[in-house]
Amino acid sequence: MLKSCSHAIFSFILIVIFAVGNIACTPEPRLSPMQVRQITTKLFQSDYETVYRACLTILQDQGYVIKNTDMDSGLIVASITKETSAGSQVFQALMLGYIPNKGKEYELSCMVNKVSDNSTEVRLSIHETKYGQTSAWSGSSKLGAKQIYDEKLFRALFNEIEVEIKRREAMKK
């Protein structure tokens, strides 16, 4: 009885590892440069300074640490680290003897460009880097990086920026 129970648990774990491995290895569809621009760029009907400051505010509200800003060029660089839950890290350590997935770091760059006196374009770029251990004897290191092109994520950020722009414009009146 105990042997069949442990065999079932072992089989279940193998199935879960295989399923997660297949999901993680599914290639993302290739996007053309125009599709990328469509996802990552939005035109706002507001002046440059209002849009620039709204972008800074929203990134800080989201928990990003602002690393560099240059209002003259329109560049904002920010990052945020999201650690895997403690429970997940304990589970990984118990099952594998090390922690392959300690978390992710996101670096975001924002380019704010003046199009006209009341029209400003914002282009966002988000880079995700996973970090963890490659074996029980290694320290934490960066394990993989990729650009993020999640339309819902960009749409949500742009919507929050738009709300902040409207809030700032209302305060000017």
Image: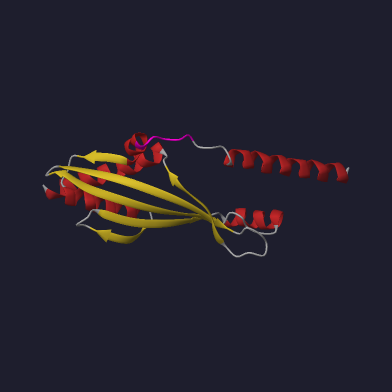
Inspect this view and state whether residue 129 appears.
yes
Which quadrant of the figure has residue 65? bottom left
In the picture, measured across the screen, residue 103 lies left or right of residue 108, that is: right
For this rendering, which residue is in front, 41 or 56? 41
Residue 32 in magenta stretch: yes
Q: How is the image coloured?
A: secondary structure
Q: Residue at x 23, y 39 (%)?
A: 43
Which quadrant of the figure has residue 10? top right
Q: Residue at x 17, y 52 (%)?
A: 49
In the picture, measured across the screen, residue 87 lies left or right of residue 45, that is: right
| Residue 149 on image: x %, y % | 41, 41
Position of residue 29 relative to residue 3, above or below, is above
| Residue 13 on image: x %, y % | 72, 44
Inspect this view and state whether residue 64 appears.
no
Residue 101 in magenta stretch: no
Task: Count the numbered circles shown.
Answer: 0
For this rendering, which residue is in front, 107 or 173? 107
Q: Give, as a single range, the part of the protein colored magenta.
A: 29-33
User: Where, quadrant-wise, is the N terminus in this rendering?
Assistant: top right
| Residue 33 on image: x %, y % | 36, 37
In the picture, measured across the screen, residue 17 lies left or right of residue 29, that is: right
Main SS of residues in magenta: loop
Q: Residue at x 19, y 57 (%)?
A: 72
Position of residue 97 relative to residue 111, above or below, is below
| Residue 110 on image: x %, y % | 30, 50
